[in-house]
Image (tube, grey):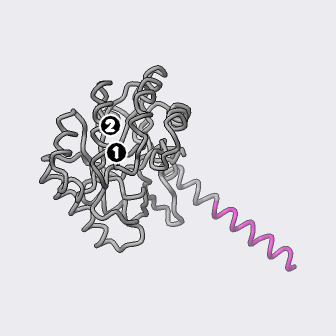
Amino acid sequence: MMKIFFAKKVFLLVFALMIVFGLGFLSGKFSSSGTIPTMGLLAREMPIFSVKKSGEVCLTFDISWGEKTLPLVLKVLQENQVPATFFLSGPWAVKHPNETKAIIDGGHEIASHGDRHINLSQYPKEAVKENISKAYDDLLSVAGRVAPYFRPPNGDYDDVVIDTARELGFETVIWAVDSLDWKNPGPDYMVDRVLKRSFPGAIILCHASDSSKEIHLALPRMIQGLRAKGFKLVTLSKLVEGGTIQRMDPR
């Protein structure tokens, strides 16, 4: 009798799960676009990792400190006529208004990298809100315009970070390909890594902070290699335009 009772409980549990998942698919809660299901049939969205779009990729550069690497990066981008998206921390932009202007004058896009460089998932909602809001105010005061994209410091996020950023008008953006330039592994390694991992619609992570000491050496061959693979390099806003945002982590 105990075996029969246990078997019935297992059957009922499996049947209940089948109903849950069935309803989830019918209601569109489970999808390849990166929607994550919960037991309450509610869905939360992941950050942006890439964009479903043929023929284009995006180079992105985070900056939180220093001023030596940026001119070297801007020089390479200018020589190769490549527009990029720069995620700037608010304090850096306030401290470096001329450098911020140089990014804009180079035809590049400015987005937010937050205020204090901390792991926001470890903080309450109000602190996350203050971090994002202050960075936006600072960036706007220096740059005059800010793209509606937010890359959290260290790429660290949770539900609160994503939801708070969206409430403030920003989509949280991570990346599909990490150049690992922040580890300074050598130009050859970075070029090979980016070219092997890139795909149509990929968002590529680089840095123009001074901790990235070799990115300007890898960048020319990186650009040439991406173009040789048939990719056009565009800003994040251009990549999103006409494409479909992908929220599944491909890394």
**Helix, strand, or loop for circle 2?**
helix
The residues colored magenta run 1-17
Q: Is residue 91 left or right of residue 210?
A: left
Residue located at (31% from left, 31% from top): 77
Residue 94 x, y percent position in the rendering: 17, 56
Q: Nearer the viewer, residue 215 or 29?
A: 215
- Mark 2 is on which residue type? Val
Question: Which mark, by number, is residue 73?
Answer: 2
Q: For residue 228: magenta?
A: no
- Mark 1 is on which residue type? Ala
Assess whether mark 2 and mark 1 are in contact (beta carbons under 8 angstroms). Answer: yes
Question: Which mark, by number, is residue 134?
Answer: none
Residue neighbourhood size for the residue with mark 2, other residues' Cα within 10 Å, grouped as few (<14), some (14–19), many (≥20): some
Residue 89 x, y percent position in the rendering: 27, 55
Residue located at (49% from left, 22% from top): 229
Residue neighbourhood size for the residue with mark 1, other residues' Cα within 10 Å, grouped as few (<14), some (14–19), many (≥20): many
| Between discs 1 and 2, the one toward the N terminus | 2
Quarter of the view holding residue 238: top left
Residue 109 x, y percent position in the rendering: 25, 40
Query: Image quadrant for the N terminus?
Result: bottom right
Question: Which mark, by number, is residue 208?
Answer: 1
Question: What distance separates the C-alpha of mark 1 from that of mark 2?
Answer: 7 Å
Q: For residue 11: magenta?
A: yes
Q: Nearer the viewer, residue 117 or 169?
A: 117
Residue located at (51% from left, 40% from top): 186
**Helix, strand, or loop for circle 1?**
loop
* Magenta span main SS: helix
